[in-house]
Image (spheres, helix red, strand yellow):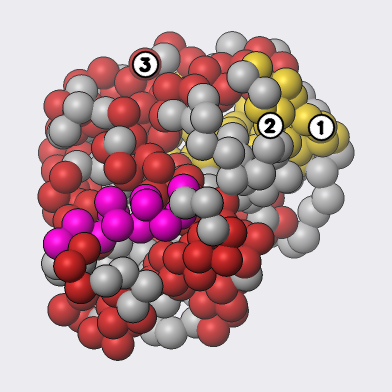
Amino acid sequence: MSAHLSLYPPIEPYDSGLLDVGDGHAVHYERVGTPGGKPAVFLHGGPGGGISPDHRRLFDPSRYDVLLFDQRGCGHSTPHAALEANTTWHLVADIERLRDLVGAEKWLVFGGSWGSTLALAYAQKHPERVSELVLRGIYTVTKAELAWYYQFGVSEMFPVQWERFQAPIPETERGDMISAYRKRLTGADPERQIEAARAWSLWEGETITLLPDPSISAAHGDGHFALAFARLENHYFVHGAWLEDGQLLRDAHRLHGIPGVIVHGRYDMPCPARYAHALHKAWPGAEFHLVEGAGHAWSEPGILDQLIRATDRFARS
């Protein structure tokens, strides 16, 4: 087998700014690659994960003109960790505002984890605006998926980490961990907010890679990052991401005719592979790569290889 493809070299944005999207929110964006190249938009995970310099490197800069942005309330967007006017459909509208800013008729949409959820919601609402879809770590935010990760399922594979995740919550409230965390993440006590945010964020940081990755755990333990990450994730998940249960799979027929690639790790803990498989069956036009020996993180070699192959192939189209 040929060697895995890896990231393009580090690159600085050729443009960046804050876009006022209304409701008191300003969204930070950056543009990388070649102005006038193939338009693409990068949707980060979380919700609340924000973009990182390495995300710029998933695209051939000589062929792509990529817009990356921090979704409402996280990264360099303001106000930090804000939940007001922050829903899936606000973000879908923001993507359209950013497409207008770029002046693209349609663009390639790249999203992983929560970014795959948002990409599917956007593409199903605006299929005419999507030239291709590259999706990784499929998450459709159904009640079953949320229960698997935050109630019973992944808890069986990571008992030590699960114990730490449960620690801030009294035993009487552990029957609904998402609601119990909501109370603490939106409470008046800033110290308890940060304590809960760190515990929520670390549960994810320690369960997304096949093998432990201390650098990912450390990033998730940072208080500033954790506050936006935990508050936004929890806010979205309490509300089922403002989607009807099963909506994204039910409406997958709207993707008909859009070329796509689905990349999913066999041992993805937060996002069970069956949902990626179900999406492929509902949208047979998409290529499906179930990567062996990989968890959830985009940076795992087999997953990264398929993502770069996908963006390289679509650059030629």
Tell me the distance, in whole angstroms, between the alpha carbons under discs 3 and 1: 26 Å
Residue hosting label 1: 17
**How many dots with numbers?**
3
Say which label, 3 or 2, has the lower sequence index: 2
Alpha carbons under labels 3 and 2: distance apart? 21 Å
User: Quick check: 294 above or below 32?
Assistant: below
Residue 183 lies in the magenta-colored region: yes
Q: Earlier in the sequence, mark 3 or mark 1?
A: 1
Report the residue at 17% width, 67% height from top: 172
Q: Depth check: give the residue in front, 33 or 159.
A: 159
What amino acid is found at the position of numbered circle 2 in the picture? Val
Q: What span is in magenta?
A: 175-186
Looking at the rendered structure, the kind of residue marked 1 is: Gly
Residue 76 position, x and y percent, is: 73, 45
Q: Which mark is residue 125?
A: 3
Work out whether 209 lies above or below 10. below
Q: Is residue 49 above or below residue 155?
A: above
Residue at x 81%, y 32% (from the top left corner): 17
Real-space CA distance between mark 1 and mark 2, rounded to the nearest whole angstrom: 8 Å
